[in-house]
Image (cartoon, helix red, strand yellow):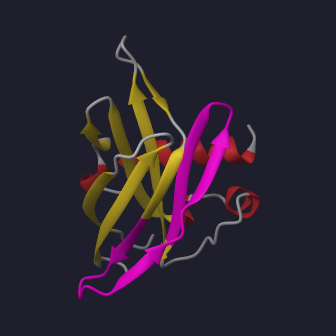
Amino acid sequence: MKPVSLLIVLCLALAGAAGPATADEKHERFGDYEVHYNVFPSTFLTPEVASANNLNRSRGIGIVNIAIMERADNGSLSTVPGQVEGQVLNDVRQAKFLAFRRIQEGEAVYFIAEYQYTGGELMTFQITARPSGHDRDLPIRFSQALFND
């Protein structure tokens, strides 16, 4: 399995591994579009996957993963290209910009960003996704606390 493939698999599969708060797949629906998201500690990545994808693997660094999905007439979902931007706020409302990077493998497109956290601190994510070719923003907001392993 190529390193990017493994990263994508980890990003999607680890939604349930980060704790009870992320046991369900998380997404918000906007008509035919859905924005799927999850957050996990960077230490969940193997050193090889982190290195191959130029990600920092360290306690206190989290990864946020976003996928813009479109629902077809038959009900199936597929990722679509677009733009993702956002910020993360700590528990005293200090905001930091999230520098999302686009990862594409075949037809699959994902957006990942790193952020710093303190174990147990509730972080609030304010994300805006926009599918390519559309002028409608898809805003999501969610909170997540991570704990160091």
Q: Residue at x 74, y 64 (%)?
A: 51
In the drawing, does residue 85 fall left or right of residue 43? left
Where residue 61 appears, x then y in whole percent? 51, 75
Is 1 or 124 nearer to us in this picture? 124
When asked about the image quadrant of residue 19, the answer is bottom left
Query: Which one is nearer the viewer's eye here, 133 or 100?
Result: 133
On the image, the x and y values in percent for residue 55 come to 65, 66
Q: Which residues are magenta?
A: 86-114
In the picture, measured across the screen, residue 26 lies left or right of residue 109, that is: left
Where residue 114 sits in the image (x, y, percent)? 52, 69
Q: Does the image show residue 101?
A: yes
At 36% from the left and 44% from the top, the residue drawn is 35
Residue drawn at 37 percent across, 58 percent down = 128
**Residue 118 seen in the figure:** no
Q: Residue at x 29, y 79 (%)?
A: 121
121 sits to left or right of 39: left
Counting every numbered tag in the picture gives 0
Q: Vertically, is 87 above or below 20?
A: below
Quadrant where the N terminus is found in the figure: top right
Residue 132 lies, in percent from the top left, at 51, 42
